Image (cartoon, rainbow, N blue to C red):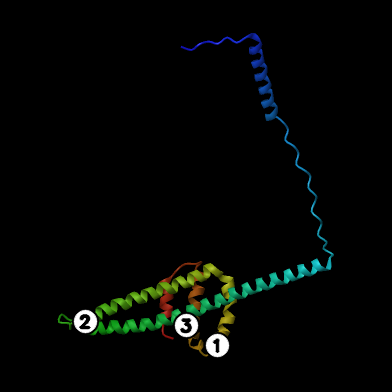
Amino acid sequence: MTKNTTWPTGVRTGFAQCSVLALACVSAASFATPAAPAPTAPPEPVELDNPSIKEQLQNLDLILRASNQKQEEIRKQAIRSNMQLGAFLCAQIQRDDAVLTQLDTLYNDSCTEPNAPQACEAQAAELSEYRQRFADLGHYYASNLVEAVSLYGQTAIEQQIPAMSLLIENNQRLAPLALDFAAHLANQQLYFDTYNTIDTHQWLARCQAPR
């Protein structure tokens, strides 16, 4: 059972005054205006007429120009390397197509009879493997062509064609790729003309054509 405690009148009045004072203090603290931040000194102006600062700015400008020029040259070199890869893959497609045609002819001549020799099983496996390799090569060639256009754009690629043609013409190791490079450029131009339409069948047919 809770026992009621009766406080004297003077004590009750003191408690009430303390409560009111505490509430007033809390209210005053809640709505007090925060102190304004201490003023900071304005930054010192840069003296552009200072010869030392002028020299530093000129040096920085030269560094930035050299960096941009180097990046641009790296980009051009990457485009030419991609063109060379396209020509090489086109040449490889022609060679592999010739080998595949020969293997297919040999298999049809000796392994299509009812009493085909036992060695035909190995020939069939080899023919199937070579066909898969040829298909993978075609996909790789198509992916390389499409990704180059996506990375560099038509304008940047076309700007490097004269330089790459001159490089192939004057380099004995690259000279055999001249016709393959022309076939690759024709495939690339077809891609441009058809608004980036992928035509792997026609691209491979051009690479497979005798040269």
Residue 104's spot in the image, x, y percent?
A: 29, 81
Viewer-nearest of discs 2 and 3: 2
Q: Which residue is mark 2?
A: 120
- Disc 2 secondary structure class: helix
The residue sitting at 60% across, 10% down in the picture is: 7
30 relative to 79, above or below: above
Q: Which residue is mark 1?
A: 169
Viewer-nearest of discs 2 and 1: 2
Task: Say what amino acid the circle numbered 2 marks.
Answer: Cys
Quick check: marks 3 and 1 in contact, CB under 8 Å?
A: no
Residue 125's spot in the image, x, y percent?
A: 26, 77
How crowded pointer 2 is (Cα within 10 Å; few <14, some 14-19, many 20+) is rated as some
The residue sitting at 47% across, 67% down in the picture is: 197
Q: How far apart in space, not on screen, are marks 3 and 1 (Cα)?
A: 13 Å
Quick check: marks 2 and 3 in contact, CB under 8 Å?
A: no
Q: How far apart in space, not on screen, are marks 2 and 1 (Cα)?
A: 45 Å
How crowded pointer 3 is (Cα within 10 Å; few <14, some 14-19, many 20+) is rated as many
Task: Say what amino acid the circle numbered 1 marks.
Answer: Glu
Task: Say what amino acid the circle numbered 3 marks.
Answer: Asp
Residue 47's spot in the image, x, y percent?
A: 83, 61
Q: Quadrant of the C terminus?
A: bottom left
